Every structure is written in C-alpha cells, then in structure tokens.
Amino acid sequence: MAGPTEETEVTHAARMGKAIVRGVAVGFPVCLIGLTVAIWLITDLDIVDSVATALLPGILLGGFAGGFAGVAATMD
C-alpha cells in the first residue's frame, strides 16, 4: 500500500507567483486605507466620499506596488 513518493520541487516561477499574490494581498488594503486617510485629511470630504474617491487609485496602486514588491522579493 505504498503511495507515490515523488518529491515535489518548488520552482522559481512558483515562488515568484506566490510572492506576487502575497504582495498584492498586502498592497491592496494598505494603499486603499492610506489613500483614504490622506484624501480625508487633505480635502473637506467625509469618510464615505473619501473611500469612494480612493477606491480606484488604491486598487491600481496596490496591485502595481504589491506585484512589484513580490517580484523584487524573489530576485536572486
């Protein structure tokens, strides 16, 4: 009843993909919250309008910055 004993090797592409996903998962909320607070403090908008204003730039910046950080983390 011996099962297959294949050793799985983690490739560089798999490590990079995991690092990019991790970076984007951290980058989204950090950028969204940071931009919301900055817009809220700088302008005279209320918090709901600040979230609405920061939503698209926060998602785009979080995705870009998180992906870049993930790639940079896996560089040899």
Image (cartoon, rainbow, N blue to C red):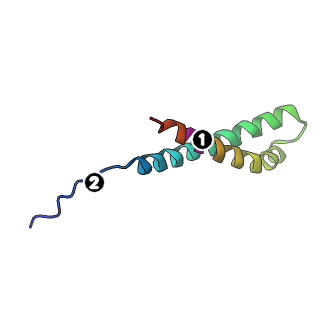
Identify the residue under disc 1: 68
Point 59% across, 41% down: residue: 68
Q: Quadrant of the C terminus?
A: top left
Identify the residue under disc 2: 8
Q: Which mark is residue 6?
A: none
Q: Quadrant of the N terminus?
A: bottom left
Q: Check residue 69 for magenta coloring.
A: yes
Point 42% across, 46% down: residue: 15
Badge 2 amino acid: Thr
Badge 1 amino acid: Phe
- Range shown magenta: 66-70
Position of residue 39 measured from the top left corner of the image (x, y, whole percent): 82, 37
Query: Which of the 4 image quarters holds residue 38?
Result: top right
Callout 2: few (<14), some (14-19), or many (20+) C-alpha neighbours within 10 Å? few
Position of residue 19 measured from the top left corner of the image (x, y, whole percent): 49, 44
Query: Which of the 4 image quarters holds residue 69?
Result: top right
Residue 75 sits above or below residue 16 on the image: above
Position of residue 54 measured from the top left corner of the image (x, y, whole percent): 78, 45
Point 34% across, 49% down: residue: 10
Q: Earlier in the sequence, mark 2 or mark 1?
A: 2
Magenta stretch: helix, strand or loop mostly: helix
Q: Nearer the viewer, residue 41 or 14?
A: 14
Callout 1: few (<14), some (14-19), or many (20+) C-alpha neighbours within 10 Å? some
